[in-house]
Amino acid sequence: MTRTDAMPVSPVGTLFGVPAGQDLSASSLVVMGVPFDMGYHPTRIGARSGPAHVRAHSALVAEHLDGFGTNLLRELGVIDAGDVDVRPGDVGQSFPAIEAGVSRILAAGAVPLTLGGDGAVTLPQLRALKRHRDGFAVLHFDAHTDAYDGIYPYEYNNANTFVHAVTEGLIDPAASLHVGMRDTDHRGRPGIVGVARDLGYEVVTMDEFTAMGVPALVQRIRARFAGVPVYLCWDMDVFDPSAAPGVVTPSWGGITVREGLSILRGLRGLDFAAFDVNTVSPPHDHAGLTGSLAAQVAMECVFLLDACRPAGQPG
């Protein structure tokens, strides 16, 4: 008997089922996986598998586009360029490969949307953006500043990305903003937040964000980044572990999903130069919650890029 009610299916293996390819000439947004982690965390190694995990959980998220009356992904020419050829733990081989991959996207005039990978993958991406679009600022959402000093006996690690970003002259820390930090304050001591602030960064801790609320935070961000190309770095552990358990370093007391999505939607209209969604660790992800949520964050990035275009302008 021939079935006539079979469910229509789309190809799997790419983010949101978009086409896979290497021709970037017609794309406004290019997805690229960065399956790299440093590999020395004592209990939670797994972010190297994050890109495939997010892609696998993105199909249901893509259904949110059904009511748009247009295929936004096709309109923007979104393609998935696959994964960078990296070796976890090998900075010497992997960082140049990541930088080259992002640089190729930027050289084609497209905006990269990368899927990590732990927080170390951000540094080579900043190096690439510096070569192609100087004058940008970093908007970093994370439970940690990633501006730690001397906590690991390695020159490069996932905890000192934003120290190197300053010492290498990649960004102006005074123009950048870190949001969501919460495991660095004890009895009023500045802790690692103090290191970031000493470097010149502005930091909005989780306690400060809770006191001001989403509308005030969004207003502050919009005023700060108006007219400036923005590198959006979204570490998934900015969410509370109750919503995103599958991350490298979970920290309780984070933002809720509703707060996170409201913040992202409040940023529409800013000029985004790159999107970096990282720190998904599949071995620690209960029922794929973090993978699905990371895919939703990636979809919000698609909406952010679409909002950058004047009405009626093609991708």
Image (cartoon, grey):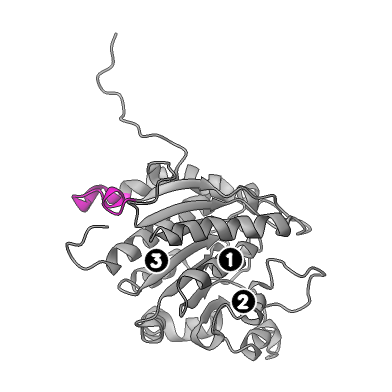
Query: Alpha-carbon distance for marks 3 and 1?
Result: 22 Å
Question: For this rendering, which residue is in front, 185 or 79?
Answer: 79
Q: Nearer the viewer, mark 3 or mark 2?
A: 2
User: Which residues lie in the magenta part?
Assistant: 64-77
Which percent across, then down, holds residue 308?
Answer: 29, 69
Quarter of the picture holding the C terminus? bottom left
Is mark 2 in CB contact (under 8 Å) with mark 1?
A: yes
Q: Is residue 46 above or below residue 201?
A: above
Residue tagged 3: 261
Q: Earlier in the sequence, mark 3 or mark 2?
A: 2
Q: Is residue 120 above or below residue 88?
A: below
Residue 72 is covered by the magenta coloring: yes
Q: Nearer the viewer, mark 3 or mark 1?
A: 1
- Amino acid type at circle 1 is Thr
- Residue drawn at x 66%, y 55% is 94
Kindly state the secondary structure of the residue where label 2 is placed. helix
Residue tagged 2: 165
Residue tagged 1: 122
- Amino acid type at circle 2 is Ala
Graded by Cα atoms within 10 Å as few (under 14), some (14 to 19) or many (20 or more), the crowding at tag 1 reads many
Residue 92 is covered by the magenta coloring: no
Q: Earlier in the sequence, mark 2 or mark 1?
A: 1
Relative placement, left or right, of 73 versus 298 is left
- Residue drawn at x 42%, y 41% is 20
Q: Main secondary structure of the magenta part?
A: helix
The quadrant in which residue 226 appears is bottom left
